[in-house]
Amino acid sequence: MHNSRLESIGVYLPSAVMSTPELLTRMEKTPEFDLFKITGMAERRVADDTADVPEDCLTMAVSAARDCLDRSRYAPDEIDIVISCSISRTTDGRRHQFEPSFAHRIAQELGATSAIHFDVSNACAGMMTGVYLLDRMIRSGEVRNGLVLSGEHITPIAFTAAREMEDSRDPQFASLSVGDSAVAALVDRATDDADVIHDIELMTCSEYSHLCLGMPSDDTGDLAMYTNNQMMHAEDRLSLWPTFHRDKLADDGRRFADEGYDFVVQHQVGSRFIDFMNNVGENIFGTPMPQSLSVVERFANTATTSHYLVLHQALAERRIPKGSKILLVPAASGVVTGFLSATVSSLEV
Amino acid sequence: MATVITSTALSPSDDAGSAIGYAASAGSACLQQAGLTPADVDVLINVGVYRDSNISEPSVAALIQKRIGINLDYLHDIDRQAAFSFDLMNGACGVLNAVQAGGSLLAVGSARRVLVVSADTHPSMDPTRAGTAEFPYASTGAALLLERSDDARGFGRVHHRSLPGAHGVNGYIPLNEAGSEGRNTIAVDRDGGVLERMLDLAVDSVHGALAAEYGTDAAAAPAAALDRTLLITSQPSPDFASRLAKRLGLASDAAVTVEGVKGDPHTSALAYGFRQAQDAGRLAGHDRLLFLAVGAGLSSAASLYDLTGDAEGAAR
């Protein structure tokens, strides 16, 4: 059975930067809260899908894929599978697309015409789910390599929230925390221990699947997201990750403290959330957390792409020494939790 | 060792028009028939495309999972049976992609049972708006339980084709035009002549699958190569299956036409075809099934399914 590895990674970030004060000027009702203090987000990127060359989920995903393939040993026609994982899936002038699959359109644009293709939708755990499936398909021998990617033009939900929300207790409050981006990761067979995905395990606890719902707004229109923050971020929800992770390791007689993780990347919900997650982890595992990486201040919560964007930025800033073992922890509506651990050495940007 | 269907169920028709409801009722019935409980499911894959209120988050699978009662809260469950779910979308072909991805989960031991559910509905959940010229898809759902066989029975490789150019079918929410009606609005644009293109692609896919499985000689004579093989296809039009059979030089009853559904059963078509053929006793006299789906893209997926477990038959 072949292990898999992260072979290459690419991103696309829209050039337009929107500061948090600028976002708040879009609000119909003057905010009584300090969004930067609550989230730690100073700015986010905002795609322009009305430009001559539009930035939307499709174009951004294709750009990220090209960036990824520029660093990859694979040409587009050597890719066995393309898995697109975005939530927003908008293109062709604000059309939220259901079929054909985004993956089909991306594969055609790239010239990966014989690749297997399908979309995965799993809220903010989308790319993690895509990598999970690809890892298992590589292990089983079904495919040799594949591209997992997501173009996420998600800021329209922030603008819907700005038009409609009442105060910080409004179910659309969390929608203010998103940013746009696209990330593509090429995953293939590992050839040594220097680059390898060790574990990727995911779980959905469906009791809480109604706590965060994305759908069109029935008020001012366009996409919107409604979150019960209090219930979603209750300590019991946050404990799901370390409990599941601990149990999975214990099945193999392993312990978190012995795994030698060098870095942890939590979902980029906000700086406080990241601290909470690391604290809960520390309490349940009974050991200090590895160094926590984040892009929340500059790029906010980019939904499906967040962990891989953090990884990309940290690699670009040369913050991850070769041979480092990284731990990615998803947290998504569903609710989905789990963990991915990988050693990265030749992954460069 | 292969991926085998161990139980199937179709959702009973009702007026609720909820894709979540259809998938959950089919999924629950599928487990019950197999003598299993929700705790026996390791992975739930939803391949439905058109959903209640155009929900984009969480996965529709998570909402179906809750309705079936699979892994509600790991933390407070005495048995701590973890389970995972997600949506996998590729139009009518999605169910065969789920066979492929689910098959890998079974093969590497990440799951012992994968429940694949499918359901489509008009987002307004008004069943009278389904199966119409504007929205051609039926308001219905189905479920397939996948496990590993210990013999040669089950699915072979899934073969794919994609055509460049026009997508044939485009399904989307026109967000700007929909305004405050986005939860109830869906557009499905079908190109003129798309059914002919789908038929051409289907024929091409059958040739491709036969060539890959049995060599080019078999592909050149599909009627002989598909002896004792029942075709179970997507149903983009009521006569699609029989027209495909004719194009391949097969008897018109060599392919299953789904009955009793108003509109295209879309992502549930293969489960419908399989279950209705089973109920009508039509699997008898066949050694194999050929599952074939053609959908938007255009894309196709095809896989031969061995019914006998007889390696001779599979190798023919």
Image: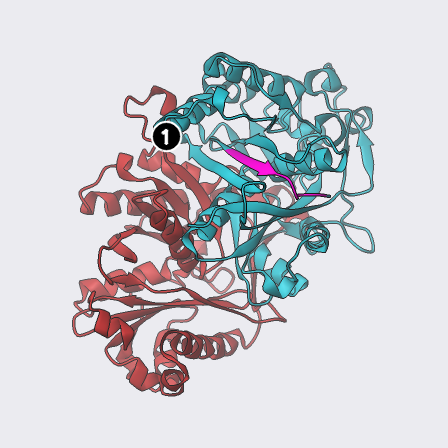
Chain A tint as drawn: cyan
Stretch in magenta: A340-348
Identify which residue, A205 or B218, lies in the foreground.
B218
The answer to whether residue A255 is magenta is: no
User: In the image, what residue type sits under mark 1?
Assistant: Asp
The percent coordinates of residue B67 (x first, y second) are 35, 36
In the displayed structure, A171 sits above or below B176; it is: above
Please give the name of the residue rendered at 59% of the width and 33% of the height, measured from the top-left corner: A225
* Residue B209 sits in quarter: bottom left
Please give the name of the residue rendered at 32% of the width and 30% of the height, measured from the top-left corner: B81
Identify which residue, A255 or A105, lies in the foreground.
A255
Mark 1 surroundings within 10 Å by alpha-carbon count, few (fewer than 14), some (14 through 19), many (20 or more): few
Q: Is residue A289 left or right of residue B20?
A: right
Give the SS element for disc 1: loop
The percent coordinates of residue B266 (x first, y second) are 42, 60
Q: Is residue A124 visible?
A: no
The chain that appears red in the image is B
Identify which residue, A233 or A156, lies in the foreground.
A233
Q: Return the residue at label 1.
A: A252
Q: Is residue A228 visible?
A: yes
In the displayed structure, B11 sits above or below A206; it is: below
Which chain is mark 1 on?
A: A
The answer to whether residue A344 is magenta is: yes
Please give the name of the residue rendered at 73% of the width and 35% of the height, measured from the top-left corner: A313
* Residue A13 sits in quarter: top right
Q: Is residue A264 left or right of residue B28?
A: right
